[in-house]
Structures are given as structure tokens and as C-alpha cells.
Image (cartoon, grey):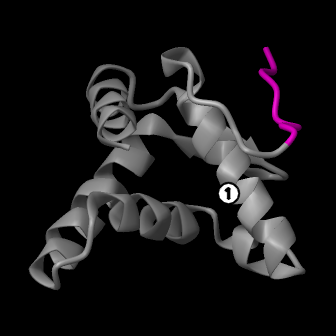
């Protein structure tokens, strides 16, 4: 997870307007995700929570439609696919069959 967070921060600094992930009509840029991860990381670390908690909190904050995915197992699958998608260049793979793809 540390490598993923470092990558998000780097991409957020270099290409903040580049879309990191799109879900339905929502598009999340690396800049937005990096900023929210940093914000949540600051708050959550004060309560002894991990950096991965900051990532998931930031993702839910930036893509509120994730909350609408039911059942919870389906929501967790989509979140896992987003995590794997963002980590694809580091060889991270989803534990579920991925449905996300690049769109140009």
C-alpha cells in the first residue's frame, strides 16, 4: 500500500488533472485523490489509524456513488478493483476478476 500511496502523491504532484479512475459519471483525478489522502492521513494518524485507512476514506469521500453499490460485497469488489487499477503498473492484482479498463 505504501508504494501505491507514494505513486498517487507523485502523480498528483506531476499530473494533477490526469484522471486516476472513473466510475459511472464520476471522474477522480490524481490531484484530488492525492489531496484527500493527505488530508485524511493527517487526521487518521492522530487516532492511530493506518495510511491504507486514509486511502479508503479518501476514495469514499471523492466517489460518493460507491456508497450506493449494494450489496456490500459488490461495493468491496469495486473498491478492490479500483485499488488494483491504481496499482496496475506495480503489478498489483485484484483478488477478484477485474472489470475496469483503460479508456482513451
Q: Is residue 27 above or below residue 30?
A: below
Image coordinates of residue 61 in percent, x first then y, are: 51, 70
Q: Specify the quadrant of the image occupied by residue 43.
A: bottom left
**Residue 56 picture location, percent across and down:** 48, 64
Residue 79 is situated, as x and y percent measured from the top left of the image, at 67, 57
Q: Is residue 48 above or below residue 30?
A: below
Q: Is residue 90 above or below residue 94?
A: above
Camera-nearest residue between 9 and 16:
9
Q: What residue sits 56% from the left and 33% below the top?
A: 86
**Between residues 43 and 17, which one lies in front from this camera angle?**
43
Q: Is residue 92 magenta?
A: no
Of helix, strand and loop, which mostly describes the magenta segment? Answer: loop
Q: At 29% across and 41% down in the image, what residue appears?
A: 2
Q: How many marks?
A: 1
Please give the range of residues in magenta: 97-104
Instruction: Quickly name the residue at label 1.
Output: 79
In the rendered image, the quadrant that contains the C terminus is top right
Residue drawn at x 35%, y 28% is 7
Q: Residue at x 35, y 59 (%)?
A: 36
Q: Nearer the viewer, residue 16 or 49?
A: 49
Task: Indicate the secondary structure of the residue bearing disc 1.
Answer: helix
Q: Position of residue 92 (x, y in %)?
A: 57, 29
| Quarter the N terminus occupies | top left
Q: Residue furthest bottom?
A: 47
70 sits to left or right of 2:
right
- Residue 74 shown left or right of residue 86 in the figure: right
For this orientation, the residue located farthest to the left is 46
Is 54 rendered above or below residue 9?
below
**Mark 1 nearby-residue class (10 Å; few <14, some 14–19, many ≥20):** some
In the rendered image, which quarter is residue 31 located in? top left
Q: In the image, is residue 100 part of the stretch drawn in magenta?
A: yes
Amino acid at each position: 500500500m505504501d508504494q501505491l500511496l507514494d505513486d498517487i502523491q507523485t502523480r498528483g504532484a506531476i499530473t494533477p488533472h490526469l484522471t486516476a479512475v472513473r466510475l459511472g459519471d464520476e471522474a477522480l483525478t490524481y490531484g484530488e485523490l492525492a489531496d484527500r489522502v493527505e488530508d485524511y492521513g493527517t487526521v487518521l494518524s492522530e487516532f492511530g489509524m493506518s495510511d491504507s485507512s486514509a486511502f479508503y476514506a479518501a476514495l469514499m469521500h471523492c466517489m460518493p456513488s460507491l456508497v450506493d453499490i449494494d450489496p456490500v460485497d459488490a461495493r468491496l469488489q469495486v473498491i478492490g478493483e479500483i485499488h488494483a487499477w491504481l496499482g496496475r503498473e506495480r503489478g498489483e492484482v485484484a483478488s477478484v476478476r477485474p472489470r475496469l479498463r483503460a479508456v482513451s
